[in-house]
Amino acid sequence: MEKASKQKRYFTSESVTEGHPDKVCDQIADAILDDIFTEDPSARVAVEVCATTGMVMVFGEVSTSHYCDIPGIVRGVVKDIGYDDSSLGFDYKTCAVLSSLDEQSPDIARGVDEASDYVGCDEIDKLGAGDQGMMFGCATDETPELMPLPIMLAHALTRRLTEARKSGEVPWLRPDGKAQVTVEYVDGEPKRVDVVVVSAQHSDDVDRQDLENTIIEKVIKKAIPAKWLDKKTKFYINPTGRFVIGGPAGDSGVTGRKIIVDTYGGYCPHGGGALSGKDPTKVDRSGTYMARYVCKNLVAAGICRRVELQVAYAIGRARPVSVYVDTFGTGVVDDSTVAKIVSEVFDLRPRAIIRRLRLNRPVYRETANYGHFGRAEFSWEKTDRVEELKAALAKYTL
């Protein structure tokens, strides 16, 4: 009898550094949210930011009692990132800061302040979702963080680029940069890294060969564990040959354009809503965090090895309109039963999510770099519902 051939597949994810123009904008938006939440945790915030050569614009809707020094926050973030010299084409001292902020629309506020399905019995029902939409979460046992391997390795690379730059270990690195990792899967299990792409902004005087060697030895090999690399792994370093002009001077940046970097690297679907700059009444943010929390706890409880969750809301209503679960055949019970367990254990109403994950706190700027998930410092990464899930599962498996 012939042995079945092994099925190979390749999956790629990318990450970007904190100096990438879109990430500059995400960090500014979340720094503004954090500043407001230090004094007014019930504020409504929906801030967008765009950046280009010599200019940052902040716009959106904010309802708060707190005075927010927008220019000071913008310049502080830009400085922290490392844009501190005019020779970079963008720096905190000389960039113009424009702002145009209005209050939240009263038509939206009325449905958030008092949900249309609120009947006066349960206070948690009173807060309605700040918008309609569908949010996705996922978890998989292929990494200790219960995250997909490609995005975790891509984030490790961009973190390492920033560390090497800020520490002075690689003095010719500049703030902008990107990384991309292709992982080879055999019969659904990650086996090796097939391709690594790194694009790193650099000073004008660095030798091309020195740049390649340094990135391979001091970035890639320090960020990616040796067990994933082999002689067949391909490295593509600054494929255009030159990356001197970068950051907002090279490309304009806008909030919300790196939502795949922010989440799972394309490993699961995305509802389309961005995360940064939004307070947690916006289910684009809080619903996405809760979906991850649910999925991670399901995998940690041994109910499945891989899971994807979709939760959908209508604006102004507290209770989700649908919950969808897919365990890709890895569940110990069928998916409809897993969905019932999720509904029994987790409260997916916005106010319940905010309370459970403690989202009315200034924790958001840290989320804006290197992914919102797979990082133990965030409340939605806790696996503190495992025992409840196991107890709920037992009712269906006796």
Image (spheres, rainbow, N blue to C red):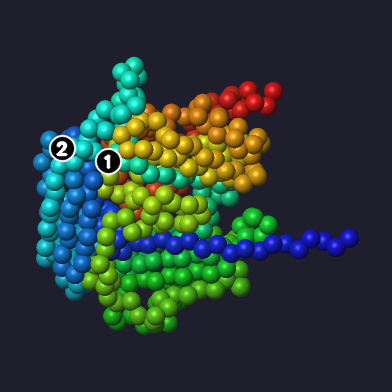
User: Can residue 82 be seen by looking at this rendering?
Assistant: yes
Q: Quadrant of the C terminus?
A: top right
Q: Which residue lies under the disc numbered 2?
A: 64
Q: Position of residue 242 (x, y in %)?
A: 35, 80
- Is 37 in front, or is 253? 253
Numbered label attached to residue 279: 1
User: Can residue 223 be seen by looking at this rendering?
Assistant: no
Q: Position of residue 53 (x, y in %)?
A: 19, 70
**Residue pictured at 49% horizontal, 37% vertical:** 323
Direction from residue 183 to residue 319 in the image, left or right? left
**Residue pictured at 39% horizontal, 66% vertical:** 178
Direction from residue 119 to residue 51 in the image, left or right? left
- Is 322 in front, or is 127? 322
Give above or below for 240 relative to 366.
Answer: below
Residue 325 figure quarter: top right
Q: Residues within 10 Å of mark 1 (few under 14, many from 20)?
A: many
Whole-Å distance between the Cαs marked 2 and 1?
12 Å
Give above or below for 189 relative to 338.
Answer: below
Q: Position of residue 373 (x, y in %)?
A: 43, 47
- Is 86 in front, or is 250? 250
Give above or below for 233 relative to 92.
Answer: below
**Residue pictured at 30% horizontal, 38% vertical:** 130
Please report whichever mark, 2 or 1, sits nearer to the chain's N-terminal start.
Answer: 2
Q: Amino acid at mark 1?
A: Asp
Q: Dot 1: what SS?
A: loop
Name the outermost residue toward the top.
121
Q: Quadrant of the N terminus?
A: bottom right
